[in-house]
Amino acid sequence: QVQLVESGGGLVQAGGSLRLSCAASGSIFSSATMNWYRQAPGKERELVATITSRDITNYAVAVKDRFTISRDNAKKTIYLQMNSLKPEDTAVYYCNLRLAYYNSWGQGTQVTVSS
């Protein structure tokens, strides 16, 4: 079983930056596709960013050019650098690991952007 632990959330003013981290357990991390999702109050969970095992990245239109996803296989950790934050980025951010039949989620970290 893979465990994921997010950190780095908090309260920031609009225009500010935060960096989220997600640390994974187990031995499959380097082969897995890793995702960041977010869920705002009253809304469905949405995919924010993806990084494959070959470091191919993809972003939601709403965050493209502001957010950057990266991974460090030696540390079994992914990151989400969030710049130029907007109030609409306020949500709980979740880390997700996908590989074959693995589909693991972290507990989430709250990001609040004040106007």
Image (spheres, grey):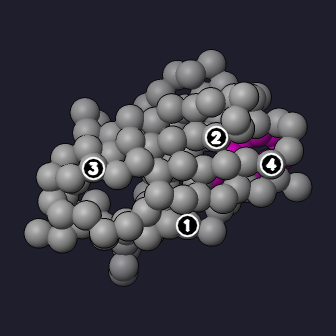
Q: Residue at x 43, y 70 (%)?
A: 110
Q: Secondary structure at mark 2?
A: strand
Q: Is residue 36 left or right of residue 48?
A: right
Earlier sequence position, callout 1 versus callout 4: 4
**Structural distance between the alpha carbons of marks 2 and 4:** 9 Å
Q: Main secondary structure of the magenta part?
A: strand
Q: Is residue 23 visible?
A: yes
Task: Indicate which disc residue 25 carries.
Answer: 4
Badge 1: residue crowd in 10 Å (few <14, some 14–19, many ≥20): many
Q: Secondary structure at mark 4?
A: loop
Earlier sequence position, callout 2 versus callout 1: 2
Boundaries of the magenta span:
96-103
Residue named by callout 3: 17
**Structural distance between the alpha carbons of marks 2 and 1:** 15 Å
Farthest residue toward the bottom?
A: 42
Residue named by callout 1: 108
**Structural distance between the alpha carbons of marks 4 and 3:** 27 Å
Please identify the quarter of the rendering in which residue 38 is found.
Answer: bottom left
Residue named by callout 2: 77
Q: Secondary structure at mark 1?
A: loop
**Structural distance between the alpha carbons of marks 1 and 4:** 16 Å
Badge 3: residue crowd in 10 Å (few <14, some 14–19, many ≥20): some
